Amino acid sequence: MTDQIDEKTVDLAELASEFWKLLRNYDRVVDAAPENLKGGLIAQAKYGNRRLALILERHGMHIETFDGAPYSANLPVTAVNAEDVVGERDSVIEQTLEPAIIIGTTAIRTGRVFLRAEKSLE
């Protein structure tokens, strides 16, 4: 399927990833905003998230994030701190830094994540 993905689709996926990151940064602005402004800012963020999902859906795409998921090599992500958790039995995705963009069942843009080592109970 990846050989059927045109340049415009790849561009849309890249733009979606950048917009997703912008919305995550916007959340921090909302947190720091005065209480009297938060309602409007939150509504704008929700609207932006809905629009992003709808636009991607029209093109058969969606965003995948992995916060809290067990890390696996088959996930469409690159762990930016993989060397820090090498040798640990289990690691969990602490934070999605960039989402994966999926079309059908194919990742057309791989995500980036930050891992944390899970302490084993042994």
Image (spheres, rainbow, N blue to C red):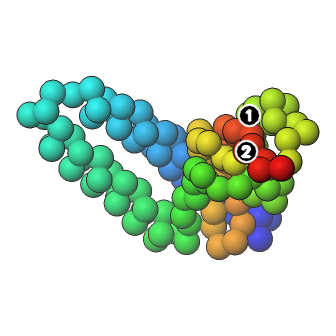
User: If you read the primary sequence from the N terminus, does the residue marked by circle 1 or circle 2 appear first?
Assistant: 1
Q: Is residue 62 visible?
A: yes
25 shown above or below 113: above
Q: Position of residue 76 (x, y in %)?
A: 73, 55
Marks 1 and 2 sit apart, C-alpha to C-alpha, by: 17 Å
Location of mark 1 (residue): 80
Residue 88: quarter of image? top right
Viewer-nearest of labels 1 and 2? 2
Q: Nearer the viewer, residue 97 or 81?
A: 81
Q: Position of residue 87 (x, y in %)?
A: 91, 39
Q: Which mark is residue 118?
A: 2
Q: Is residue 9 visible?
A: no
104 shown above or below 46: below
Residue at (77% x, 50% y) in the render: 121
Q: Which mark is residue 102?
A: none
Residue at (35% x, 37% y) in the render: 27
Q: Residue furthest front?
A: 122
Give the side of residue 105 with respect to residue 17, left or right.
right
Q: Residue furthest left?
A: 36
Which secondary structure, mark 2? strand
Q: Nearer the viewer, residue 116 or 39?
A: 116
119 shown above or below 74: above
Give the side of residue 58 with respect to residue 76, left or right.
left
Q: Position of residue 72 (x, y in %)?
A: 79, 56
What amino acid does circle 2 point to? Glu
Residue at (71% x, 55% y) in the render: 70
Query: How would you rate the neighbour count of disc 1 (Cα within 10 Å): few for under 14, some for 14-19, many for 20 or more?
Result: few
